[in-house]
Image: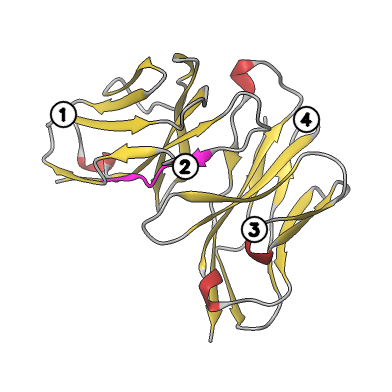
Amino acid sequence: AQSVAQPEDQVNVAEGNPLTVKCTYSVSGNPYLFWYVQYPNRGLQFLLKYITGDNLVKGSYGFEAEFNKSQTSFHLKKPSALVSDSALYFCAVRDLAYSGAGSYQLTFGKGTKLSVIP
Amino acid sequence: DAGVIQSPRHEVTEMGQEVTLRCKPISGHDYLFWYRQTMMRGLELLIYFNNNVPIDDSGMPEDRFSAKMPNASFSTLKIQPSEPRDSAVYFCATKAAVSTDTQYFGPGTRLTVL
């Protein structure tokens, strides 16, 4: 079974400071990993994904995430936070140990609310 | 492309009434997912389709919930009869078969059952 954990319900950071939103995962095989962002009253928007290759993945709006297989983590980072980054962030995983049409489920974490303080 | 379209955006109904939520996927996307989001349980997958065929409905809470995809351009999620505990935001998401699992979400339907 695949699972993902976001250990922090909320992260507060001052504008201009670096931010990190944590995610750890559990899979049987290799993972596909994703970050999505949700602004108030909106659907989830894709930010970035790790499939294979370089462990550092760059995505939209200056965000990046680092895949760490030994720590089973995929933390989201940004060097300098903006007030407009305030939103709900979701990590998601798919376990590549399963194949076929029935395996295309993503498991989402519970979300981390990021508040960037001016 | 207009993205995933959901209607209505908001629905308020009384307990016992039938509710139908609608989704139009991105053209060419072969997979369609229905999710429910609540504060208590987060984002839950209810059911998903591949080429209009339901693949996994294990997340559907009970028999009051049903989903159909009569063609590649349209899906419905129906709750009959509705209960207050069904109040949530319901999202539809779609993905292309050739993509590496990136799902694209609609704006959601906020359902309130009184």
Residue sitting nearer the eye, A72 or B22:
B22
Residue at 44 percent of width and 15 percent of height: B52
In the rendered structure, the residue with mark 3 lies on which chain? A
C-beta proximity under 8 Å, tags 3 and 1: no
Q: CA distance from mark 4 to mark 3?
A: 29 Å
C-beta proximity under 8 Å, tags 3 and 2: no
Residue A94, image quadrant: top right
Q: CA distance from mark 1 to mark 2?
A: 24 Å
Q: Which residues are magenta?
A: B104-110
**Amino acid at the residue labelled 4:** Ser
Q: CA distance from mark 3 to mark 1?
A: 40 Å
In the rendered structure, the residue with mark 4 lies on which chain? A
How dense is the environment of label 3, judged by Cα within 10 Å: few (below 14), some, or many (20 and up)? few
**Residue receiving disc 4:** A28
In the rendered structure, the residue with mark 2 lies on which chain? B
Q: CA distance from mark 4 to mark 1?
A: 41 Å
Residue at 52 percent of width and 22 percent of height: B30
Kindly state the secondary structure of the residue where label 4 is placed.
loop
**Residue receiving disc 3:** A60
Judge from the rendering whether residue A41 lies leftward or rightward of residue A116; answer left or right: left
**Residue receiving disc 2:** B105
How dense is the environment of label 4, judged by Cα within 10 Å: few (below 14), some, or many (20 and up)? few
